[in-house]
Image (tube, rainbow, N blue to C red):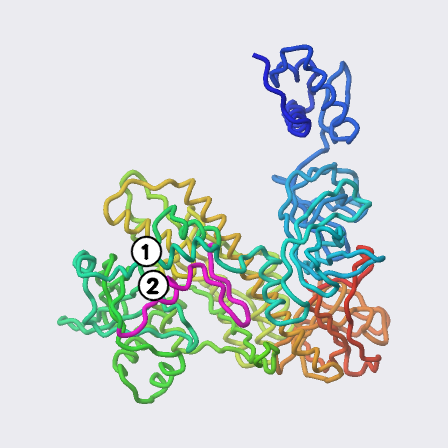
Amino acid sequence: MPRSHPSPGQLAQEVLAAVRQAGHAGITSQQLALQLGFKDKSHRYMLFDAIDSLLDEGRIQSGKKGRYTAQGGRDAVEGVISIIASGAGYVRVEGGAEDVFVHMRNVGMALHGDRVQIKVMGGRGSRAEGKVLEVLQRRRKEFVGTIQKHQGRLVLVADDQRIQKPFFIPPHESLNGREGDKAIIELGEWKNDRDLPRGKVVRILGRAGEHHVEMHAILAEFGLPLEFPEGVVKASEEIANGVTDAEIAKRRDVRSIPTITIDPDDAKDLDDALSVRKLGNGNWEVGVHIADVSHYVRPRSIIDMEAANRATSVYLVDRVVPMLPEKLSNDLCSLNPHTDKLSFSAIFELDEKAHVVNEWFGRTAMRSQRRFAYAEAQAIIDGGEGDFKNEVLTLHRLAQVLRRERIANGALEIGGNEVKFRLDEKGAPIGVYEKVMGPANWLIEEFMLLANKRVAAWVGKQKKGGVPPFVYRVHDLPDPEKVEQLRALAKSFGHSLAMAKGEDLPHAINRLLHDVKGKEEENVIKQVAIRSMAKAIYSTENIGHYGLAFEHYTHFTSPIRRYPDLLVHRALAHYLAGGAHLDADALDLSCKHSSRMEKQAADAERASIRYKQAEYLLARIGQSFEGIISGLTNWGVYVELRENRCEGMIGLRELPGDLYRFDQDHYCVVGQRTGRRFRLGDELMVTVKAVDMDRRTVDFALFEDRAPVTTSGKFVRKHAGKKKPGRR
């Protein structure tokens, strides 16, 4: 039978797909008609219309013997484009050795992160250059930014600096938005790259510059949710407390064992607890008890699907955007003191050297007898008095043994301190400080690491039918080129990153970090060491965790705030019950999505920190601070202020007395005439010169530079490439 009539747009897409599939050989109109099911000659005019349309648009081309091929021929490749500050882009081509450079004039209608088809052309030297032929898939359809007036029309300038063009907002699609409003728009029609893309306002967030508005804008910018759907909240409110006599009878009852939690004093989701008691044989039983989220959140339920989509809780400077609704995260699944709770536990028998003698995994019923803030636990560790003192000190002593052994085995000691803000009642920053990790933090960390490691190892040792599919937390080897940069930096400060006989790289890095501890260059060397490392991700392929020096590792300990942990709980329960192998492909998809969402959440957190740092310095324009060079690029010198850890940039053109260039080989900025050098870790006195709240950036000037002090206001990026490059 002849096929039914498709819409013109649908038919054009089918023709284009068939032409692409035909490859270099091409395909004739007759072959297209047969392939697409147009047997009735009277209806083939629709096919010819689609072909003519694609020819006019330049998406296909006519070749010899009436054969049609996709525009671009052999040199057409696909990939994801990343736009940089100048407006140009780089396309990451699948299987390609190097990214293809795309000049800003050849970007067309591609936006940052889009999947595009490009034509590869000859470039300068050995660098390949390309031209965007077509946008195959948009990375995103919604964008957040500030509404401004441009030539009498409303436009939205995106907060994401990689979105180079403003969006034109037709008056009837503005939702009555005004100049200065933060808004979310949906990308509309865009037929010609010489025109502005159209945007339809879908939500007004409020006035730009207001604290809560800017935090919501950051979440929207990174595609993160602002609130839970009503259906999810309603479903959570209907969940009953699962702690019943019948449920407890199915579980190992550990409610009578001394159990404590140690968390930040403002934490509301307490998802882990520790129990400890001495056994008759002199060994110690330590229980790591994790909230049993899997009891309440069932697979494929509306709550589970929302949690899977979010994949993680998000931590901004002033708030937590939870993965689970409050009824679950702060109530049913929070291990609040003096309350019976359902948990999933890893219980270990440890000897005095903290060696695991026996272990048990399974569902439990527990009860925390004491909630500690980190400061309270630290006071006991430091010699103070308090209830559960013996338990805290015993856990601390065993944790110290575990930590020493882990580091001796090659685990890296690159723990960074967190930047925190003191905010006033309106959310304005009145102080910036570092949250320093100490023994109380390490106490919790070591037992969480132990549980994560042993759970992964148990699954990895199940060999029946092959190792069962599982969710691992993996960390690959560091980038050799970046390790060499770290080596060169260490040498410039008079230190060595050399491996002694029988020593491996992690031990050498730890020795370097020990050598610089307490010295001026410590923070810079630590930051460069962190940058040399690969990013940890979730994967079903266990390649081990390089940074922790673990052969097996997973995330088991935070199912309230990480979806992979919930998957691990379900998988572990399934395998403990003797279940068959789970679907590896489904787990792998969840791993990839969770890794991607984890990165987006981390990017949003950094953006909120940068915004508050910029806001803090906005009130201090003209003031001078001591700083240390934290980064060097082709366009500027980045400086981190000692007093508050805020970072800003001195443009190379703003450095006085010479013309400066970035020397990549020696990783320094050099004056062409004077030979003056700026290196990572150098101390500088800088003045806050300008703050751009739209871009969350700060401009510094050398203290010796007496240039006039300014603060930038609103702007429309009229021409891509004509503004100063932004932050890295």
Compared across the picture, whether 382 is left or right of 162 comes to left
Q: Check the image and name the residue furthest to the bottom.
A: 384
Three-letter amino acid code at the position of disc 1? Tyr
**Can residue 641 be seen in the rendering of this structure?**
yes
Q: Give the magenta part as a residue range.
A: 311-338
Q: Is residue 508 above or below residue 174?
A: below
Classify 10 Å Cα crowding around label 1: few (below 14), some (14-19), many (20 and above): some
Three-letter amino acid code at the position of disc 2? Cys
Compared across the picture, whether 135 is left or right of 706 comes to left
Q: Check the image and name the residue furthest to the left.
A: 280
Which is nearer the eye, 476 or 18?
Answer: 18
Q: Which of the image's four quarters has the N terminus?
A: top right
Residue 590 got which mark? none
Q: Secondary structure at mark 2?
A: loop
Residue 333 got which mark? 2
Q: Secondary structure at mark 1?
A: helix
Q: Does the magenta segment cover residue 320?
A: yes
Q: Does the magenta segment cover residue 227?
A: no
Q: Is residue 222 above or below residue 4?
A: below
Residue 547 appears at what percent x and percent y? Answer: 46, 61
**Can residue 553 be seen in the rendering of this structure?**
no
Q: Which of the image's four quarters has the C terminus?
A: bottom right
Mark 1 and mark 2 in contact? Answer it, CB < 8 Å.
yes
Image quadrant where residue 257 sits: bottom left
Image quadrant where residue 496 sits: bottom right
